[in-house]
Amino acid sequence: MSKIMTPKRKSAHLVMNRLAVVLKEERVSNKDLAEALGYEPATVSKWATNTIQPPLATFFRIALTINRDLKDFFISSKDIEGEEKKKLLKELAVIAEKGKRTGKKN
């Protein structure tokens, strides 16, 4: 496997997956992947731009479909240290809090 390059992170945009990079390396378009998986191209585009994240099972389907290792789709957490790590942990805590199901009715 070639060295994985971590994409530059926009200050207000959390990059958690490398789908766009992998698709470009494999010369697979969002439209082609969408057709292969049965999704709308706009959905695949949102995954590729990290606007939304697909479930892990979907990443596994993508890996099998385009014959790539599942780990190729993710940024290594081992490469994140110091202040960047603290900042990411805060951002991820906010995301996790939004996604919590407490069982309480509002």
Image: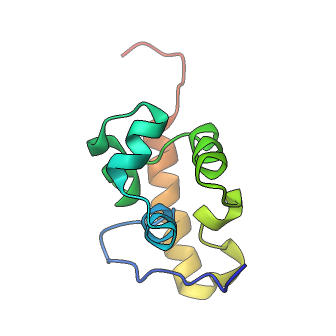
Q: Is residue 27 above or below residue 48?
A: below
Q: Is residue 52 visible?
A: no
**Percent position (x, y) of residue 40?**
31, 36
- Is residue 101 left or right of 27 when viewed as pictured? right
Q: Is residue 11 visible?
A: yes
In the depicted view, which residue is nearer to us: 30 or 10?
30
In the depicted view, which residue is nearer to us: 37 or 91?
37
Residue at 64 percent across and 66 percent down: it is 72
Write down the quadrant of residue 66 in the picture.
bottom right
**Percent position (x, y) of residue 31?**
32, 48
**Percent position (x, y) of residue 78?**
72, 78
Residue at 42 percent across and 65 percent down: it is 20
Q: Is residue 88 above or below residue 29?
A: below
Exactly how many numbered labels are in the figure? Answer: 0
Residue at 43 percent across and 30 percent down: it is 38
In the depicted view, which residue is nearer to us: 13 or 47?
47
In the depicted view, which residue is nearer to us: 97 or 35?
35
Image quadrant occupied by the C terminus? top left
